[in-house]
Image (tube, rainbow, N blue to C red):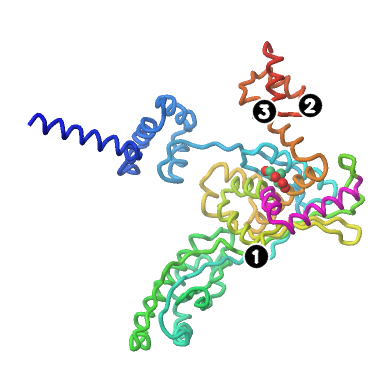
Amino acid sequence: MLMEKSLSKVSHLKKYLCQKAIGMDKQIQGFSKKSKAEKIDWVAAQFFHDAQAAKALLATYWNTDEALQRLHDEFTENTLTNFYLPLGVAPNFLINGHNYVLPMAIEESSVVAAACKAAKFWVDRGGFRAEVIGVEKVGQVHFTFDGDPKSLVDFYHQIKSSLLAACAPLTKNMEQRGGGILHMELVDKTTDLENYYQLHLTFRTADAMGANFINSCLEQIANSLLAEAENYAPFKATGQSLEVIMSILSNYVPNCRVRAEVRCPKSDLGTHDGLTSEQFADKFIRAVAIAKAEPYRAVTHNKGIMNGIDAVVLATGNDFRAVEAGVHAFASRHGRYTSLSDAYYEGDDFVFSIELPLALGTVGGLTSLHPLVKWSLELLGNPNAEELMQIVAVAGLAQNFAAVHSLVSSGIQKGHMKMHLLNILNQFKASEKQKEKALTFFTHEKVSHQAVRNFLEQNTGV
Ligand code: MEV
């Protein structure tokens, strides 16, 4: 008996050690049902050396205004605290003759400063021009059909209007706001994938980004499609069957597109780190040509554009993942990843432009919920979706101008490290006095981790 007991203890211990070795002790059932305090306790106890310190840090980032904290808690699931990003502003953006101060939510040092610099540079040269090229959104019902493609086409023509009619209760409000379903077509995709077809729809969603509207319409259409197919006598008679696989909007929206540009006589560009206006313009155009020709460079070039775009997209409560996915697909639309921007001469003018898809909203989603999003939209004069598309495209163009400007003149590190100086000082836990002194010292000195370390060692008593 004793022997049996100790054997069972050993096997329990073995099982426990085995589970621990593969991390099973760090799994949990019903986590989402626990209270916030319980979730924090469990996470802190399981994953942190100092559970108390881990919990204290989360608490520091809570908002003491309970209602405000609850609002943030409810944006998503399993919220433990808030994650801060700085919200900066970039003034002096002259866009289509109007002055804007752009809200930018971004952590990367130098992005806001670069936007400010570009805005200031172009405000004296006529500012930015922007225009919306299209506002068409896309959604698809993906389905398979194992029968004769011709009979599917006949079926589709017979039921098309009833599919659309079934959406009427969903589209009514949107139609009053100038939106709705624009077009629907049956697409045969069987050369790409056996038995694969789709209903490809285009939409207008007024000032909403429109994801919920589009997805609701698509699911309604998919249900009606299925019901009609099940009752369609020729399919029943021949045993041909249709299966809906999924219904979802596409984040690739090449016809929801905006263009922005700056231009000025090339002789008005001014001198830059020893380059004359004309030399600067030539080198700038050459740098953009490289980004157009070379995908490795294009990715980084476009990343610089997205620094500006994402920052404004985030501050205005829009979905930056959707924007990113769509923009990069657009950058590859000709089969090779390329630059989103272009630079060229038109007569004596230097022209720098950008064209990209942006599905943005200024109503719905977070726009009326998140207090800082509301603030940011008010800062922009409560733009409609098309105005916001133009502002965001300009943010991307400005950021790209600042980056390429630095790259072809002083190099990127000079400005970058200057802006990074405070981060380095904070990493070394510099005192406020040391920081103040360092900012003056490094105005004319090259910033590097080693240089900052040396400076702090020589200024310990400050
Ligand atoms: C850094 O965040 C962005 C840049 O690399 C963009 C570029 O190279 O054009 C500076």
Q: Nearer the viewer, residue 314 or 367?
A: 314
Q: Is residue 347 left or right of residue 401?
A: right
Q: Dot 2, how many residues are within 10 Å of its Cα: few (below 14), some (14-19), or many (20+)?
A: few
Mark 3 lies on residue: 422
Q: Give the secondary structure at mark 2.
A: loop
Q: Is residue 89 left or right of residue 279?
A: left
Q: Dot 1, how many residues are within 10 Å of its Cα: few (below 14), some (14-19), or many (20+)?
A: few
Q: CA distance from mark 2 to mark 1?
A: 44 Å
| In the depicted structure, whether residue 461 falls above or below residue 215 | above
Span of residues in magenta:
276-304
Some atom of ligand 1 lies within 8 Å of the CB belonging to the residue at label 2: no
The structure residue drawn at horizontal position 54% and vertical position 69%, both measured from the top left corner, is 180
| In the depicted structure, whether residue 146 falls above or below residue 288 | below
- Mark closer to the chain start, 2 or 1: 1
Q: Nearer the viewer, residue 262 or 197?
A: 197
| In the depicted structure, whether residue 322 falls above or below residue 434 | below
Q: How many marks can you see?
A: 3
Mark 2 lies on residue: 445
Ligand 1 location (quadrant)? top right
Residue 104, magenta (yes or no): no
Q: CA distance from mark 2 to mark 3?
A: 14 Å
Q: Is residue 165 left or right of residue 459?
A: left
